[in-house]
Amino acid sequence: MSSITGWAAGAAGQPLKLATFDVGALGAEEVEVAVDYCGICHSDLSMINNEWGNARYPFIPGHEVVGRVVALGAQAKGLSVGQRVGIGWTAESCMHCRPCLSGDQNLCAQSVATIGGHHGGFADKLRAHWAWTIPLPEGIDLASAGPLLCGGITVLKPFLAYDIKPTARVGVVGIGGLGHMAVKFAAAWGCEVTAFTSTMAKADEARGFGAHHVVASRDSAAIEAIAGSLDLLLVTVNVPMDWNALLNTLAPKGRMHVVGAVLEPIPVPAFALIMGQREVSGSPTGSPVDIARMLDFAARHDIRPQVEMFPMANVNEALQHLADGKARYRIVLQAGG
């Protein structure tokens, strides 16, 4: 029997319990990875609690994995046993549909997420397709790299997709798990960065991440004062905002890009778009090539998520810490503890 042992969700809202699952023989194009570190993302909480209605129990959460290749399927390519690799939100895609063949494998309708119907990284090991098992570049900090594989590529994707220039003025709404990484990436990209936060106590911290300006996101006068100035506004929060006021911060041809999973519909006033030829868009994570580019960029500029470390055995405590809003700003589980 080939098995995986990890901390599994058995039902919505229940604590994770250590369990062992028979996962069968390694697929021809699969890679088996021993887990060294795994980040905890808010998406893990959402899946554990079935907030999106698509969880399939039991499953092992965790999709920000840093580890080592321990086994290769007969047709796995480009990797070697012992190699340091990362696995993010996606574990596999079909590799033959138009998005896959176009290099947009993250948009594959048949893609399989690393969690939910698939066992993730709160475990001793996990499996993924070789193309989604991303080699880690030299110089990357292994302990803090996990959150880059989901949150990092999520916030960098619009820069890659929309050819954001270093001369752009970029706003980041929310200085949390996603937002603090967005500020770091935008600043390293060369942009002038304005951070929006509901807690001005984070202002100095936001500047430390690279923000040039900090604006109170609930202060309508402060937001109005920067109207028409931003080329890109990156929304990383999942709560309702004054969307009309935020849209008005965009310069002509500016773009508001949403990566936070706002559960309520976002009202978009037509004239706010039409008169300034503005755009509203969103994106998930990125393709394997996007992730590799993001990791290379992070290593070159020493971009590290700010993390708190927990032993893997304390995963339920770590999840509660995140649920209570106490994480500053990402949580990483270390295997063997």
Image: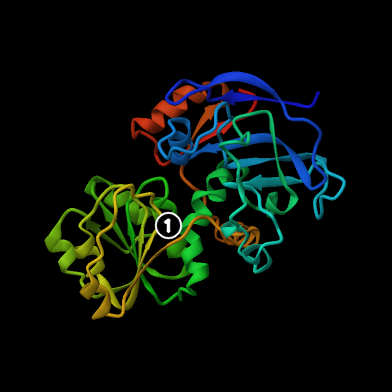
Q: Nearer the viewer, residue 192 or 275?
A: 275
- Quickly name the residue at label 1: 182
Q: Position of residue 170 (x, y in %)?
A: 36, 68
Q: Position of residue 217 (x, y in %)?
A: 22, 55
Q: Is residue 147 left or right of residue 183?
A: right
Residue 88 is at least partly visible in this image: no
Neighbourhood count class around disc 1 (C-alpha, 10 Å): few under 14, some 14–19, many 20 upward: many
Q: Nearer the viewer, residue 69 or 203?
A: 69
Q: In percent of the image, x 30 and y 51: which residue is there?
A: 204
Residue type at the position of mark 1: Ala
Which residue in the rendered view is the most extreme toward the right?
Answer: 74
Q: Position of residue 308 (x, y in %)?
A: 47, 35
Q: Position of residue 244 (x, y in %)?
A: 20, 64
Q: Nearer the viewer, residue 306 or 93?
A: 93
Tell me how many marks there are.
Answer: 1
For the N terminus, the quadrant is top right
Q: In percent of the image, x 39 and y 39: which residue is there?
A: 328
* Residue 64 to residue 57: above or below: below
Q: Is residue 86 left or right of residue 165?
A: right
Residue 294 is at least partly visible in this image: yes
Which residue in the rendered view is the most extreme toward the left?
Answer: 221
Q: In percent of the image, x 40 and y 33: which residue is there?
A: 322
What kind of colouring is applied to the model shown?
rainbow
Q: Which of the 4 image quadrants contains residue 336?
A: top right
Q: Which of the 4 image quadrants contains residue 319?
A: top left
State the SS at label 1.
helix
